[in-house]
Amino acid sequence: MTMNSEDKHSTMQRAHMDTNPNTEAGASVVDQLGRPLRDLRISVTDQCNFRCRYCMPEEIFGADYPFLQEDKLLSFDEIERLARLFVSIGVKKLRITGGEPLLRRNLPQLIQQLASIQGVEDIALTTNGSLLKRHAHDLKKAGLQRVAVSLDSLNDKTFGAINGRGFKTKPVLEGIEAAKEAGLQVKVNMVVQRGVNDQDILPMAHYFFEKGHILRFIEFMDVGNANKWRLDQVVPSKEIQEMIHKELPLEPLESNYTGEVAKRYRYKGTDKEVGFISSVTQTFCSTCTRARISADGTLYTCLFASQGTDLREQLRSDTSDQKLISFIQTTWNKREDRYSELRSNDTIKKDRKVEMSHIGG
Ligand code: SAM
Ligand code: SF4
Ligand code: SF4
């Protein structure tokens, strides 16, 4: 007997419920492809002090750009409430992002509020690192566990051109060290673009090998509409891995958990690691358990979504927790997103996608 898609879906959902620790609370939720909701990325601002060419090019995000007014941003209490509700239906990990999240005033206060939520296993932050030195200690004290610092080159000229504002690498490198000294787990993320910073792959690998920080190479993605992405600008992870292997031999490692986006390798004969996030050449939609909330409280179920669902209005009316939970569950339950798997399919390319700086990667 063959199953129709509805039967298949409810079978997947049942199978998931049977093994899900949240089943007793009756609250867990899976999407149309059987993927549970486990991670929540929260953008706390759409503003940034950088103008990375691939994310917020100056000619689009210039002085006249209509960034969100203060009253449109979710408050810390609204973010905390949402996070609590998401955790009650299965989210375990929170990641704070932006824009540049360290531009949001009193961020450690938010971290402290999130750390107080029962059931949160992990709180991480993604940052460009330029302001990290100043805040690392307070963030750690507030309960932050991990930080991912974005750095695309060690060369000031290249870095300044990529970040669009001539920022030098020194503050970022100091931020990385300050985060480590504060006791945060640190990873460094490098987006590689052919003809822009591929010459920096080996210097970055050597530098962070010596420093003992995990470096992850990220394939340049067609997020948003502003960055004029072309496939020939993507340097496939395999190529990068082979390049490094010739100088610093690598061996593959097992994933830490199902759905880990980075493929991990160890430098042979050491316990030092490097990772590859191959969102273009080796997609990972089938295990994608991530939801995203933009700084204005819109829920997105995919990085490449063209539309989100407003939560702010409901937070600001007297909608009950239970109603909000059912709304989020229904939204996740309807989710069918798998953009990266379908990237080469022409029909999905036509929609306008949400900008990366709006939802934070
Ligand atoms: N401002 C913070 C930062 O740069 O880390 C957080 C927000 S930023 C949008 C999050 C991550 O997205 C950064 O690591 C950035 O390099 C990455 N990113 C932005 N645009 C990208 C693109 N087109 N392809 C791949 N990664 C991108
Ligand atoms: Fe800012 Fe991060 Fe986007 Fe660069 S990648 S412009 S640092 S939000
Ligand atoms: Fe997840 Fe969408 Fe990325 Fe696929 S394309 S991994 S569904 S965010």
Image (tube, rainbow, N blue to C red):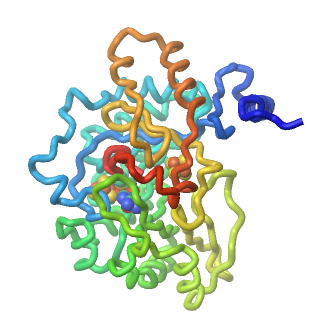
Of the pair 133 and 63, the residue shown nearer to us = 63
* Residue occupying image coordinates x 38% and y 69%: 230
* Residue occupying image coordinates x 42% and y 66%: 220
Q: Is residue 84 above or below residue 112?
A: above
Q: Is residue 320 above or below residue 160?
A: above
Q: Residue furthest right?
A: 1
Q: Position of residue 204 (x, y in %)?
A: 43, 78
Q: Position of residue 112 (x, y in %)?
A: 42, 34
Q: Is residue 281 above or below residue 114?
A: below
Q: Is residue 250 above or below residue 131?
A: below
Of the pair 212 and 290, the residue shown nearer to us = 290
Q: Position of residue 207 (x, y in %)?
A: 44, 80
User: Is 2 situated left or right of 163 in this image?
Assistant: right
The quarter holding residue 174 reads bottom left
Of the pair 136 and 327, the residue shown nearer to us = 327
Work out whether residue 289 can be spotted.
yes
User: Is 213 situated left or right of 69 in this image?
Assistant: right
* Residue occupying image coordinates x 39% and y 29%: 79
Q: Residue furthest left?
A: 63
Q: Quadrant of the N terminus?
A: top right
Quadrant in which ligand 2 is drawn: bottom left
